[in-house]
C-alpha cells in the first residue's frame, strides 16, 4: 500500500484485489455495473486508486460474493445499507434467502458425496467378486440418484 504523509490512503487495483480476494477483472466489472461506485482516479496516471473506505466496501462485497449471492441481491443489499432500520426487514430477508440457498446447496453436495462413495464401494465389491454386495450397493446408489434428480 502506498500512502504519503497528510494524504488519504491510495491503493492500486492490484493491491485492492489482493486485500479483498476478488480478481481485478471482477473489481472493474462490479464498478461498470454499479455494484461498486466509480473509483477515484489518479490525476496523472488515471489509474484507479482505492481508499480505505473503498477497501472496506470491497471486503463486504467479497464476503457476499463468497456466499454465492446474486448480483441483483448484492445490489439491493448494498443499496439498503444506508437506510438503517428502515431496511432491516429486507436485509434479513435477503440474507435468510441466501442462507437457505446455501443450505440447499450443502444438502445437494452431501447427496453427491454419498453417491460417489457408494460408487467407490460398488466397484470395490465388483473388484472383490462380491456380486451380492455390489447389487445391494447399486440399489442404494440408484435411490440416491433419484433424490439427486428431485434436487435439480
Image (cartoon, helix red, strand yellow):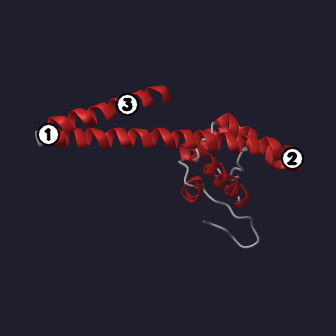
Q: Are marks 3 and 1 in contact (CB under 8 Å)?
A: no
Q: Which residue is mark 3?
A: 143
Q: Residue 35, labelled with which disc?
A: none
Q: Residue at x 69, y 58 (%)?
A: 56
Residue 12: image location, x then y, percent: 60, 56
Q: CA distance from mark 2 to mark 3?
A: 49 Å
Residue sitting at the far right: 86
**CA neighbours of label 3 inside 10 A, class few (<14), some (14 to 19), many (20+):** few
Q: Which residue is mark 1?
A: 130
Q: CA distance from mark 3 to mark 1?
A: 20 Å
Residue 77: image location, x then y, percent: 74, 43
Q: Look at the picture and state if 134 lies above or below 50.
A: above
Residue 129, image quadrant: top left
Q: Which callout, 1 or 2, points to the residue nearer the camera?
A: 1
Q: Which residue is mark 2?
A: 83
Residue sitting at the far left: 129
Amino acid at each position: 500500500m502506498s500512502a504519503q504523509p497528510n494524504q488519504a490512503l491510495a491503493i492500486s487495483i492490484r493491491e485492492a484485489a489482493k486485500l479483498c480476494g476478488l480478481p481485478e477483472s471482477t473489481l472493474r466489472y462490479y464498478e461498470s455495473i454499479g455494484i461498486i461506485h466509480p473509483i477515484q482516479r489518479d490525476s496523472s496516471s488515471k489509474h484507479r486508486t482505492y481508499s480505505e473506505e473503498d477497501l472496506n466496501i470491497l471486503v463486504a462485497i467479497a464476503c457476499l460474493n463468497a456466499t454465492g449471492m446474486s448480483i441483483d441481491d448484492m445490489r439491493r443489499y448494498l443499496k439498503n445499507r444506508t437506510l438503517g432500520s428502515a431496511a432491516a426487514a429486507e436485509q434479513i430477508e435477503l440474507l435468510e434467502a441466501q442462507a437457505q440457498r446455501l443450505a440447499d446447496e450443502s444438502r445437494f453436495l452431501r447427496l453427491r458425496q454419498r453417491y460417489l462413495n457408494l460408487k467407490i464401494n460398488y466397484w470395490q465389491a465388483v473388484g472383490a467378486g462380491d456380486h451380492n454386495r455390489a447389487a445391494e450397493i447399486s440399489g442404494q446408489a440408484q435411490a440416491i440418484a433419484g433424490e439427486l434428480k428431485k434436487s435439480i
